[in-house]
Image (cartoon, rainbow, N blue to C red):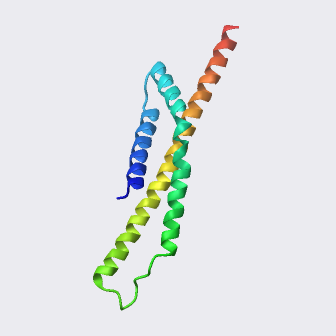
Amino acid sequence: MALQWVILTYVVAAEAAVAILLTLPSPKALKSSIVSLISFILQPLLFIIPFAAFQLLDIYWKNEHRLMCTGEICTAAERDRYEKSIYKAQRNVVLCIAACLLYWCIYRISKLYREIQIKEESEKRLKDE
């Protein structure tokens, strides 16, 4: 596996762990500190979107320029190699889509939690008045 796919795999695993951490029930003080930390980290992690898009373009280009091995002239080893490359490309597409989708989920969860906090604070201020 090439280095970019190893990096993307680790990023997807980290995003999944963060998404699970954000959705687990926890005390309010701990949850607010976790959300603020994640919100602080989200902007630098935005690099994953163009990185995944570039990798998707690379997969598309390689797919368009791949030698087809479907005729009688292909040996069994060539056919296996061709099928293996197709499976790797499909796995990599799933990784790219998962990275973008998990980033979006983390962004939305943290944004919704911040909006809930703002509404609770405004409700508390209105009650105090």
Q: Position of residue 118 (x, y in %)?
A: 63, 23
Q: Is residue 120 above or below residue 39?
A: above
Q: Position of residue 51 (x, y in %)?
A: 52, 52
**In the shown orientation, is residue 79 left or right of residue 29?**
left
Question: Quadrant of the image for the C terminus?
Answer: top right
Q: Is residue 117 above or below residue 85?
A: above
Residue located at (45% from left, 58% from top): 94
- Numbered marks: total: 0
Residue located at (44% from left, 81% from top): 68
Q: Residue furthest bottom?
A: 72
Residue 21 sits in quarter: top left
Q: Nearer the viewer, residue 48 or 106?
A: 48
Residue 121 sits in quarter: top right
Q: Residue furthest left?
A: 77
Q: Is residue 66 above or below residue 19?
A: below
Q: Nearer the viewer, residue 32 or 50?
A: 50
**In the shown orientation, is residue 60 left or right of residue 118?**
left
Q: Position of residue 38 (x, y in %)?
A: 50, 32
Residue located at (51% from left, 33% from top): 41
Q: Nearer the viewer, residue 59 or 125?
A: 59
Q: Nearer the viewer, residue 89 or 17?
A: 89
Q: Position of residue 22 (x, y in %)?
A: 46, 33
Question: Quadrant of the image for the N terminus?
Answer: bottom left
